[in-house]
Amino acid sequence: MGRLWLDAHDYGVRLLRGGSEPWLAPATLGPFYGELAALLQPHRLIVPVAPLLRANLGDERDAAAALDRVAQSHGLARSLETGLATLAHGACAGLLVLMLPGPAALGCDPEDEDALDDGVAALAQVLRALLDTALSGTILIDESEAAARAALGPLHRIAEHCGVDLRLMGEGLDMVAWDALERLAAERDTQITIPADSEPEAVLAQLAALRTAEREG
């Protein structure tokens, strides 16, 4: 039976933190994910880095230039160092999978090859920080634009050099909408995102039903 990979960040922020983003107080990130893992009990729990990056990007029109500025900033480096350390030392560290957004996901024009290359170069600096704390040994990339996905080669080479499995969302994982999920695939792991506005009782009931189906084969 396949296993469940959960992206429950936005759901957990609403439920456990009243909408306050834990990446903005990075020393709280590890305890936040510890609570979320204990509540949901997934096989893997996805940790998106996008909320931290987007909080620092602002509204600049040139997304690639803004991303380069943020990637080189001491503020981002400190936030990553603190947040990743709290994750690595938490009881659920082995469950966690970091997820890096791709360049188009952060606003780089997917039709501008130079902008994509500049965005990838900036993300390479962020990736190097993540590689020191790869946690489960896998890092996901969230990028839906085909041109942006094709530009990610430098990131794959960096990760391969460090012995980390850098995986695009949807590769090796069945991506299923939360409201369409009935049971896990037999052979492949399943990745789902719990919507932020989901009712807690319904979420726990859905997860319990999945575990029952898994036990019964």
Image (tube, grey):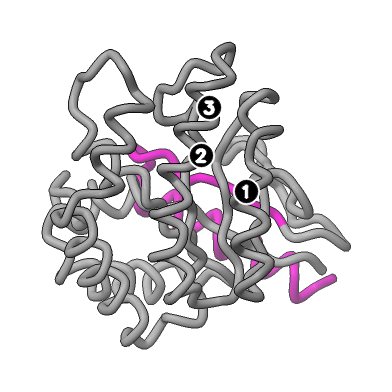
Name the kind of residue labelled 3 in the image: Leu
In the rendered image, residue 35 lying in the magenta stretch gets the answer no
Q: Which mark is residue 116?
A: 3
Within 10 Å of disc 2 (Cα), the crowding (few <14, some 14-19, many 20+) is many
Name the kind of residue labelled 2 in the image: Val
Q: Secondary structure at mark 3?
A: helix
Q: Quadrant of the C terminus?
A: bottom right
| Position of residue 7 measured from the top left corner of the image (x, y, whole percent) | 48, 52
Q: Is residue 131 toward the left or the right of residue 182 in the image?
A: left
Do callouts 3 and 2 mark residues in contact (Cβ within 8 Å)? yes
From which residue to which does the magenta span run? 190-217
In this figure, which residue is indicated by the disc labeled 1?
A: 154
| Position of residue 34 measured from the top left corner of the image (x, y, whole percent) | 32, 76
Between residues 99 and 117, which one lies in front from this camera angle? 117
| Chief SS of the magenta region | helix
Q: Which mark is residue 120?
A: 2
